[in-house]
Amino acid sequence: MYIIVVYDVDVKRVAKVHRFLRTHLHWRQNSVFEGEVSRAQLYEIKRTLEGLIGDGDSVLIYELPTGNFTLHVIGTDKNPAGEII
Amino acid sequence: MYIIVVYDVDVKRVAKVHRFLRTHLHWRQNSVFEGEVSRAQLYEIKRTLEGLIGDGDSVLIYELPTGNFTLHVIGTDKNPAGEII
């Protein structure tokens, strides 16, 4: 499956969340990551994020069937991925 | 179709972009909007955003087949949508 992760976390925790997501996914923009994962990896990512975030923080994970979307970029493409489907 | 819009724009233009997207989509989190649109509406949204943004700004629009995704929320659900599919 393919996931898009968007986080909105307190500035104190941004670096930690960013560093963790970078090890699993492709950084796309500001607080957006995306990439292909297995069900086990998605479970692991959710579990780890639950441990990293704090009060008032929010992380959205959109789970899509692989390759079943179109990405439109308006303005600067901050980090186009070679491996993106 | 269903779209997820994530913007990363200069602070000077955030309010304008936010206000415009709010008229078409459901606000989801920080700089994330989503909603059901027609092809004509998507075209209009893209065209208007191109006019609103400036140097270094970036807006990503993920276009998905309607209803073909699962949303996982970790932490606070900042604005759950009644009408979300």
Image (tube, coloured by chain):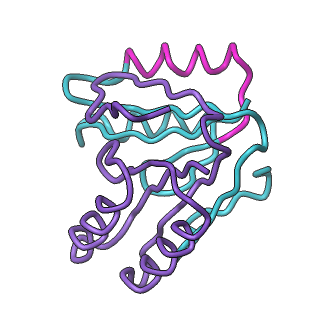
Chain colours: A purple, B cyan
Query: Looking at the picture, does residue B14 appear above or below residue B52?
Result: below
The answer to which quarter of the image holds residue B10 is top left
Instruction: Residue at 24%, 73% (x, y): give it.
Output: A16
* Viewer can see residue B24: no
Residue B58: x and y, percent? 32, 31
Report the front residue among A5 and B6: A5
**In this rendering, would B37 be left or right of A45?**
right
Residue B36 lies in the magenta-colored region: yes
Instruction: Residue at 55%, 34% (x, y): give it.
Output: B62
Number of numbered labels in the structure image: 0
* Residue range of the region highlighted in magenta in the rendering: B35-51
Residue A14 lies in the magenta-colored region: no
Query: Looking at the picture, does residue B41 appear above or below residue A41?
Result: above
* Viewer can see residue B17: yes
**In this rendering, would B24 be left or right of B50?**
right
Instruction: Residue at 51%, 28% (x, y): give it.
Output: A71
Residue B79: x and y, percent? 60, 62
**In this rendering, would B67 be left or right of A54?**
right
Q: Main secondary structure of the magenta part?
A: helix
Instruction: Residue at 32%, 40% (x, y): give it.
Output: B8
Query: Looking at the picture, does residue B58 appear above or below residue B75?
Result: above
Report the front residue among A66 and B78: A66
Residue B36: x and y, percent? 73, 35
Residue B18: x and y, percent? 45, 40
The answer to which quarter of the image holds residue B30 is bottom left
The answer to which quarter of the image holds residue A25 is bottom left
